[in-house]
Amino acid sequence: MLKRFEAARQVYNACLGEAMKRVRLLKQSRAYRQALKLPKGKAGKTAMPLQREQHRARIDAFYHAREIIGFRKYDLMNWATRFTHSWLRDHIASQEVKALVRRAFGATERWLYGTDKQCKKGKCTKKKKNCTVCGKPKFKRYGEIHSVENITNLQGLRWRASGQYVQWRDLKICAMIDPFNPVQTHGLSQPVKYIRIVRRVIKGRNRFYVQLVLAGKPMQRTPINEGAEVGLDLGPSTIAIVSEGKALLREFCIQVDDASKEIRCLQRKLDRQRRANNPDCYDVMGSAIKGKHPKNKSKRMIKTEVVLQETQRRQAEHRKSLQGQLVNLILSLGNVIKTEKLSYRAWQKQWGKSIGKHAPGMFMQMLRRKAKNTGGAVVEFSAYQNRLSQFDHVTGEVKKKPLSQRWHYFEDGTKIQRDLYSAFLALCVDADSNILDADRANELWSSVGPLLLAAFQEAIQFAKSQGHTPACFGTSQS
């Protein structure tokens, strides 16, 4: 298995290198530079006929330039047929090669069109060969490829439903299946499109898992309230969820194992071992010498690396499990989720450790995916335009409040927790115009207002049962 994964890595790197070479030739071609000079135009319902014509002409010009150079997916697949006439054919079949070509071509295409995160003005300011800022794809190092898949279940790597095993050329790998697991039972009853083998390192040992890509719909273990709307206010340490029938206030993934102290100790130990094994890479003052890279590893250093990787893996798996439970809870209230569009990368500058531990960006990505699979959507609107935490739906005024003020006060003297009130206002945002509807807020306040007060009391009782009362709820100010 490891030999075939290594063969897949070499095929991927070769395809990625060829694709990046063709991208450089494409940017130097005359047809591509002429296409850049064409007016961009506009597409969509609001576009004029002339704008649509310009848009279509520009797309055709770029396609013609790519056709001349041969930077298309099937051109790269045609180039990759050479691997079926080399020693790699004993390990990787043509269908797996096509899947690797798709992966390499997709990464290069995203880099070409700038759909990944880009540097300022599209130019990388880092002097590294592989920059993670400008979206330039990386070559895989030894042992870095963790999955191999096929594009069909008819030949090569395929699933045999009759014997419930994976056949990969001359290898026959039996799967460990739980007959009492309803999810696996439902999945095995569906037709298989193709399969994927995933390698994971657990406690320093390789574990191989089979992922079946199936036709049909997945099994829904959690009931989904389809069509219902939910307002969501996500903060660095709290999350407020409000629907027309229920409201919740919780600390965001507070149960995640806090292994930061253990990880820090292991990293310091690893650094001491690295310095002891590579003394020629550091000067007298202990600073790293430019141009020298520590490569020597002792057995104890390898064991420390395994323990560090396992600690980080456990923390990540626990966080993913908690976020999945929270997503299912939100979808049980409604699959149309309304929330502010925020930059979670900017949060890292102010709350770096908390954001790294709880990963709100990964939570939102999971929420978007699951909401889309259930027929719903995550509606994100401008935080600057609506100003939910500063708006008062009774008077219609906007009053600035510092982040330390955790309560919203009305003119009659009543008050409400700030995060719950923001989630309530998010529920009242119009999904089409992405503008706050104050009239709807006034209509719903009589029925939803008591739910917000009850949600705060419930959150305090739940926090006390856990042994602490978080200051982010604003209990001291209440």
Image (cartoon, helix red, strand yellow):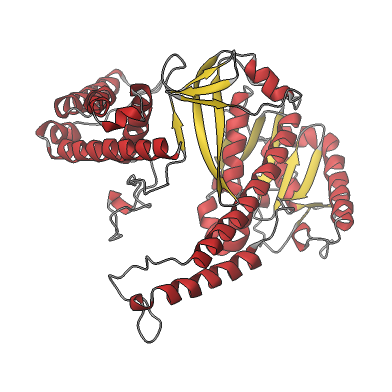
Q: Give residue 189's quadrant in the image.
A: top right
Q: x, y percentage for residue 29?
A: 12, 35
Q: Residue at x 42, y 46 (%)?
A: 144
In the displayed structure, 412 sits above or below 220; it is below
In the displayed structure, 276 sits above or below 236; it is below
Question: Quick one: 202 or 408, which is closer to the camera?
Answer: 202
In the displayed structure, 146 sits above or below 369; it is below
Question: Quick one: 1 or 220, which is closer to the camera?
Answer: 1
Question: Quick one: 337 or 383, which is closer to the camera?
Answer: 337
Please state, as top left, top right, bottom left or bottom right, where the C terminus lies in the image.
bottom right
Please state the total of marks drawn on the protein image.
0
Q: x, y percentage for residue 465?
A: 89, 55
Residue 227 in sight in this render: no
Residue 399 in sight in this render: yes
Q: x, y percentage for residue 393?
A: 72, 43
Q: Give residue 400's quadrant in the image.
A: bottom right
Which residue, as the protein is rendered here, is positioned at the far left?
A: 30
Q: Residue at x 67, y 51 (%)?
A: 389
Q: x, y percentage for residue 421?
A: 74, 46
Q: Give residue 404's quadrant in the image.
A: bottom right
Q: Residue at x 28, y 35 (%)?
A: 15
Question: Quick one: 279 or 400, which is closer to the camera?
Answer: 279
In this picture, residue 253 sits left or right of residue 415:
left
